[in-house]
Amino acid sequence: MSLRRASSLVLVVALLSAAAAPALAAPSNGAGPGSGAPGKPGGGICADIENNLLAAEAEADKRSGTKAAEKWSRAADGFWRDGEVVGCSWAA
């Protein structure tokens, strides 16, 4: 993983963590571990990365056959790798 890629991943995870912080501070609803709560693999951050992945794939599909499609395809690949790094079940 290049230094640029690593720093991008750190930035994405930090931004997503900041967005998930209010949800993490919410009162307990009694859900235990493995409930898919925000901040757990399969929960908040993974859902955000997956949404970004799906949006990038849709943009790549819209621009099929153009140079812009390659940009969106690379972005989708990056989101997939981010999901693997974070431990999202859909990227396993």
Image (cartoon, rainbow, N blue to C red):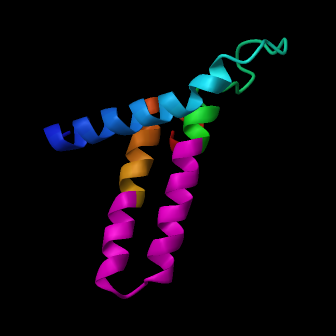
Q: Quadrant of residue 5?
A: top left
Residue 92: image location, x then y, percent? 51, 39
Magenta-drawn segment: 48-75
What residue appears at the point 64 percent right and 32 percent down from the top-left corner? 43
Q: Quadrant of residue 13?
A: top left
Residue 67 covered by magenta stretch: yes
Task: Let me know if residue 2 appears in the view.
Answer: no
Q: Is residue 48 left or right of residue 9?
A: right
Residue 59: image location, x then y, percent? 48, 73
Residue at the outermost right position: 30
What residue appears at the point 61 percent right and 42 percent down from the top-left corner? 47
Q: Main secondary structure of the magenta part?
A: helix
Q: Quadrant of residue 20?
A: top right
What residue appears at the point 62 percent right and 33 percent down from the top-left corner? 44
Residue 8 covered by magenta stretch: no
Residue at the outermost left position: 3
24 over 4 or under it: above or below: above
Q: Is residue 39 left or right of residue 68?
A: right
15 over 34 or under it: above or below: below
59 over 77 or under it: above or below: below
Residue 71: image location, x then y, percent? 31, 69
Quadrant including the N terminus: top left
